[in-house]
Image: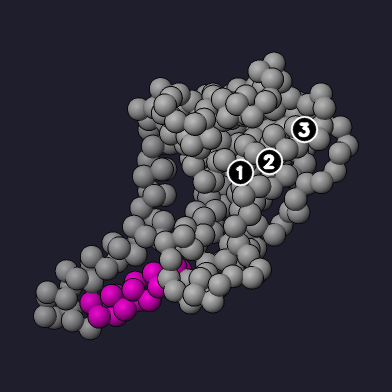
Amino acid sequence: MLFLLKKIIGGLLLPLPFLLSLMAIGLILLWLNRWQKSAKCLLTFSWLSLLLLSLQPVADRLLMPSENQYATYQDTTPVDYIVVLGGGYTYNPDWAPSSNLFPNSLPRVTEGIRLYRQHPGAKLIFTGAAAISNPMPNAKVAAMVAESLGVPEQDIIVLAQAKDTIEEAQAVSQIAGQKKLLLVTSANHLPRAMTIFQSEGLNPTPAPANQMATLGPLNPWEKAFPSAYYLSHSERAWYEALGSLWLKVKGSD
């Protein structure tokens, strides 16, 4: 129940639903003559915020501080486990396996496979429980993708009960203990994930995937026009900020 409540509240606080809620309040106030000034301020603030969060220069600069904390892992020192954290997914058996992983998940899996190729003898651990109404666990779908790309089933461990990063760290600790492991997740999620894994007594080596924020060359219009794609970058920055705040609240209990 607490997990579901956390997801609902967290979802409502993300940029698009939060700012749309402010706009709705502004529209209601606009119909009340005595609140005209407040309505105009609220609508202006929410519209301008949505615009700025949808622009590449703003969105990517919000995301960069979390993404730039760890460099891409290039070492070939032997490790025992490569842990790939779960993300967004669905399951349709008629689709190509990789089509069942959302954009935040597939790069994690492919980076895990790349590192697996560089570390003979390591085991791949996939984490993630089944979403509500989905018969297939997140971890199993990721494992199916890895197998379709040539990873032997005997080199894959599926941890299909963990619903969030805290439970993923707890499940991994039962298997990995103090052995050497790489932690693979989205670059923006990795700082928070490292904190959680370390709090469970683990000492993972960070291996970021799915870097999104860039200062590299882009077409001029990609920087000038608002885009849902770049709004999603702002959303990731916002989401991780909320997640870090939640960790601090839990830590102060």
Earlier-in-chain disc, 3 versus 1: 1
Earlier-in-chain disc, 3 versus 2: 2
Question: Does residue 81 appear left or right of residue 229 in this picture?
Answer: right
Q: Residue furthest right?
A: 77
Q: In the rendered structure, which segment of residues is drawn in magenta?
A: 38-54
Protein image colouring: one colour
Marks 3 and 2 sit apart, C-alpha to C-alpha, by: 10 Å
Viewer-side residue, 55 vs 43: 55
Question: Does residue 228 appear left or right of residue 72 in this picture?
Answer: left
Q: Which residue is mark 1?
A: 107
Q: Is residue 247 above or below residue 77?
A: below
Instruction: Tell me, yes or no, if residue 92 can be seen here.
Output: yes
Q: Where is residue 127? Give x, y as percent.
A: 59, 30
Q: Amino acid at mark 1?
A: Pro
Q: Which residue is mark 3?
A: 117
Q: Is residue 52 above or below residue 15?
A: below
Q: Where is residue 91? Give x, y as percent.
A: 43, 29
**Does the magenta-highlighted stretch encompass residue 39?**
yes
Q: Main secondary structure of the magenta part?
A: helix
Element carrying mark 1: helix
Q: Which residue is mark 2?
A: 111
Residue at screen point 65% across, 39% down: 110
Q: Amino acid at mark 2?
A: Glu
Q: Where is residue 144? Give x, y as percent.
A: 56, 25
Residue 82 placement: quadrant: top right
Asked if disc 2 and disc 1 are in contact, CB closer than 8 Å, the reply is yes
Residue at screen point 23% across, 83% down: 37
